């Protein structure tokens, strides 16, 4: 019997997969950072420019979704020398 048996259909993470996952986490964290902030100096005045800025409404969600896309890519990516 062979000692180097490999389960078919199992997840084999390589260093490259882990690097992509780390990049994805960093991109998600960057998106969360872009989403935060907007402290109002006067609590009695509602400033719509702080809450509904382009950075918070458009850019941050796109960056977060890009990070999740990188995570999916990192999980599904197969190494070139993976046997089937």
Image (spheres, rainbow, N blue to C red):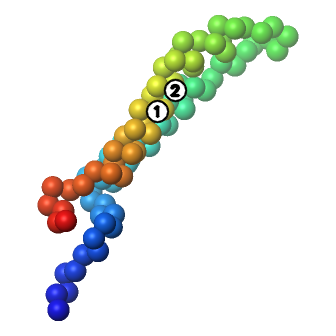
Residue ranking furthest to the right: 44
SS under mark 1 = helix
Residue ranking furthest to the bottom: 1
- Res 11 → quadrant: bottom left
Q: Nearer the viewer, residue 31 or 37?
A: 31
Mark 2 lies on residue = 61
Mark 1 lies on residue = 65
Decide: marks 1, 2 in contact (CB < 8 A)? yes
User: Which quarter shows the N terminus?
Assistant: bottom left
Height in image: 33 above or below 9? above
Q: Is residue 51 left or right of residue 61?
A: right
- Res 38 → quadrant: top right
Q: Can residue 30 be seen at all in this image of the molecule? A: no
- Tell me, for residue 56, which label it has, or none: none
Give the x, y percent position of residue 55. Answer: 53, 16
Q: Is residue 45 left or right of residue 16?
A: right
- Judge the density around disc 1: few (<14), some (14-19), many (≥20) Cα neighbours within 10 Å: some
SS under mark 2 = helix
Residue placed at 85% from the left, 10% from the top?
Answer: 44
């Amino acid at each position: 019997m062979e000692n180097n048996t490999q389960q078919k259909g199992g997840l084999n993470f390589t260093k490259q997969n882990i690097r992509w996952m780390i990049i994805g986490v960093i991109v998600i964290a960057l998106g969360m950072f872009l989403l935060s902030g907007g402290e109002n100096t006067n609590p009695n005045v509602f400033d719509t420019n702080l809450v509904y800025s382009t950075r918070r409404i458009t850019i941050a969600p796109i960056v977060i979704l890009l990070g999740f896309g990188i995570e999916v890519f990192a999980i599904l990516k197969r190494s070139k020398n993976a046997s089937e």
